[in-house]
Image (cartoon, coloured by chain):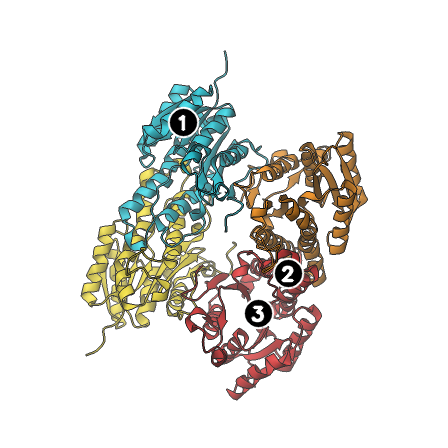
Chain colours: A red, B orange, C cyan, D yellow
Amino acid sequence: MASKKAVAVIIGVGPGLGASLAKRFAAGGYSIGLIARKESSLQPVQSELEQSGHTAMSVTADAGDAASIKNAIDTIRKKFDNDPEVLLYNASGFFYGGILDLKPEVLQAALNTTVIGALAASQEVLPGMIKNGKGTILFTGATASLRGSANFAGFAISKFGLRALGQSMARELGPQGQSMARELGPQGIHVAHIVIDGGIHSPNQAESQPDKDIDSFLNSDAIAETYWQLHIQPRSTWTQELDLRPSVEQF
Amino acid sequence: MASKKAVAVIIGVGPGLGASLAKRFAAGGYSIGLIARKESSLQPVQSELEQSGHTAMSVTADAGDAASIKNAIDTIRKKFDNDPEVLLYNASGFFYGGILDLKPEVLQAALNTTVIGALAASQEVLPGMIKNGKGTILFTGATASLRGSANFAGFAISKFGLRALGQSMARELGPQGQSMARELGPQGIHVAHIVIDGGIHSPNQAESQPDKDIDSFLNSDAIAETYWQLHIQPRSTWTQELDLRPSVEQF
Amino acid sequence: MASKKAVAVIIGVGPGLGASLAKRFAAGGYSIGLIARKESSLQPVQSELEQSGHTAMSVTADAGDAASIKNAIDTIRKKFDNDPEVLLYNASGFFYGGILDLKPEVLQAALNTTVIGALAASQEVLPGMIKNGKGTILFTGATASLRGSANFAGFAISKFGLRALGQSMARELGPQGQSMARELGPQGIHVAHIVIDGGIHSPNQAESQPDKDIDSFLNSDAIAETYWQLHIQPRSTWTQELDLRPSVEQF
Amino acid sequence: MASKKAVAVIIGVGPGLGASLAKRFAAGGYSIGLIARKESSLQPVQSELEQSGHTAMSVTADAGDAASIKNAIDTIRKKFDNDPEVLLYNASGFFYGGILDLKPEVLQAALNTTVIGALAASQEVLPGMIKNGKGTILFTGATASLRGSANFAGFAISKFGLRALGQSMARELGPQGQSMARELGPQGIHVAHIVIDGGIHSPNQAESQPDKDIDSFLNSDAIAETYWQLHIQPRSTWTQELDLRPSVEQF
């Protein structure tokens, strides 16, 4: 019997980073489960994967709704008949504006999409990873993960929170006094946080931005390659956090 | 006509830090508005203030409910017939446990109390501070503001978020293109974040902890003195963040 | 017999921060030992202190020469017949320019003045502080303590190093297996690092900068007040690091 | 005429990380210039490279002596008749002990080896990199790059300083008003800092440490792979800093 292909789940898929991650992990031999809020974000990516002979499926879900995200992952697990070995979490709320214009319910929604969705998704994949003794969970951060800037309160609060979640998980010791109370690290589960400091350019979008200076954007395929390299780091030598920015970016 | 006393609002009041802050700012000449979830947390503090001849009032509110916290501040404003000049935000959710035990709704509640309440309270006091050209907003942080540790994901996510809020506000430029779009700093509004790294001991609680080593706890009156010193810093020389810990604390 | 006045040593004295620190700690009851490279930097400060009825003495020394700085402190100790209880270290090298223009010997000199002088001075005062069970050592940092910027390599390397020294000392456990091997903290020695993020304006210099916007500079007297407040923090509630900047500073 | 092979210079070579870096970059097609203080550290690495058909040469030099390190790089440049395209800097001083036992001259020596050697080496390779429009400079950091711990003052001061150097170079704008005054980044020179948080195990040393738990050490070959991946990042998507530690390391 042929062994089942390993499964990677990507949450927050669009024509940019999500598509590049899907292609990179598919090329690495993974069946890809794509999750986004809108069908229209998913179909082009799935089509491109299938045309290249890769295995992919799409599920729409709202990353800001814990039950929705858990159901979507469960659907992928059942369809591929395998526990996800990789979780890539890109979904994120965004609000730009002054502090007096940031409505509490808008901040709640941003936190739901950016942080609570990441928690729910992690909780859905972790038991399988623990059982199988390996797994990779990568969270997509931003400049705002490290710095609360003017007019970015809503985004920074969410991205700071996601970074805290990643750190706590990387250091996770499990509930005390329970049989599952072993560290995530020694069980082979690698949690890392990638700080993307700059705008992302997708090769897919090239024709639509003919007048922009390509070198001033991060390349989404290059970002995806870094995610892949983090994934394949041996467990003796893991990165918990790194930054990525264009060579011309001021920082 | 006698000028009205300036008003300080303290959110998250109990027998420890909240009580010490109330006493210190009352001694500094402020009318004190006390807000906590439970009447029983407020009454002893208010009584102590009044017995010392200070002006104080108490309002119960749920810091995790934006409308509730805004109403409470509004009640204080009307009663004292004055815009709050000082906002001290201590309210905080807490959850200790492994990542698989942190329910999404528990994390949402912690975020509501720790971060969204701070946003709502700031939004309620900022217009008056901007109008009057001065104000101080101090957020109470913790070790977990800087570091996501195992079993502290819920607390760290919330405290990271609060820190991001404080940074963004300190750097606040206001909504673009509007008349109010000036920086908070030049308008005299000082936003700072205090990282409390250790357990707090309140002199009020001394008799109930006879066997503990006093030197291994932060003293709540000493913390309150630091908040006061931050408040009276002249605007040429403001602190945005500092840490506080006992001399014997390992860090 | 009258008890001897406590002694504060200030290294790196000029008309700005050094003079303000001297006045603040003199007002707090300390005999002041002033150390700078040039007699002309010291005399105006000493004269001002003496005219106000304070006790002060000046010693010229090169902060970049460990023996010189140790001798200067020893001279102060003998003259005042008392171990210094406070050490304030402001001396600092500076170099602005591109990486290819930073000569290794210029960097060495900056490190000697900024870091090695601070080590030598600390080593000279620590035995007395340990013996007496109390002491305060404050290091003056800068924006460059936290961030290596273009053209600031020499300054940032030195200021990063000084910050590391302060952290290690604050966490100092002493040489293992020796009788002196107790922690500095529990022995009452408070080591803190102040990040000064902006240009400093001294009231003494006001007439020479008539056209500058006062509000865009830190006020040296206000900085000195913060140093004093750090010094008098009770040992239950110590700050290891804080930042200071004008309300109008972008950061 | 065959094009010359690109050159990588590795400073601070021993049987651990230096040897692994040499093998990885040799496998990537580079001629390797090896620099260490002792001939005995260099010969086994050079022999191993040559036996695998790679091009390598060794030069002894004292990383703590700017002239010595510059001469060594110049020797390599002349021998290979090519400007180095890659500089990997591992050399580092070390001192473990209490603050009172850290002699100023020992700290100076540590700074010379860890920081000033890195500056001198960078200055020796940068003009060629600028001329050729590309280059990679990677600095080896440690836990002590981010945290000054008790008994690690000497190491932390040096490693903080090296990190500051890397940041300033990554942000380098060049001397003002000169023709060379362009940013390093846009000229294709990638400067990154790797925080190695844990003990390193070299496969070469396996037999000599039969009783150690391999999983509790970073694997030097895996570290070298990460350096290589940093080197080949396209310029749209560069990392300035990342950490590396074993999955079982507490942090």
Label 2 to label 1: alpha-carbon separation = 59 Å
Closest to the observer: D138 or A153? A153
| Residue B20: image tag | none
Q: Residue reaching furthest top? A: C1
Tell me the crowding category of disc 3: few under 14, some 14 to 19, or many 20 or more residues within 10 angstroms, Cα based: many
Between D97 and D3, the one lying in front of the other is: D3
Q: Position of residue A121 (x, y in %)?
A: 63, 69
- The residue to which callout 1 is attached is C45
CA–CA distance in space, label 3 to label 1 = 59 Å
Chain under callout 2: B
Residue assigned mark 3: A90
Do residues under tags 3 and 2 come within 8 Å of each other at their CB atoms? no
Query: Amino acid type of disc 3?
Result: Asn
Q: Within 10 angstroms of label 1, few (less than 14), some, or many (20 or more) residues?
A: many
Residue found at x 32% / y 37% = C64
Element type at marker 2? helix
Horizontal side of residue A128 vs A241, given as left or right:
right
Chain letter for mark 1, please: C
Q: Give me the C-alpha separation between circle 3 and circle 2.
A: 19 Å
Q: Nearer the viewer, residue C16 or C236?
A: C16
Q: Nearer the viewer, mark 2 or mark 1?
A: 1
Where residue A123 sits in the image (x, y, percent)? 65, 66
State the SS at label 3: loop
In front: label 3 or label 1? 1
Image: D140 above or below C138: below
What is the x, y in percent for residue B102? 68, 60
Judge left or right: residue C240 versus residue D133: right
Disc 2 and disc 1 in contact, CB within 8 angstroms: no
Asked whether the viewer can see residue B251, the reply is yes
Question: Would you name the residue on which mark 2 appears?
Answer: B99
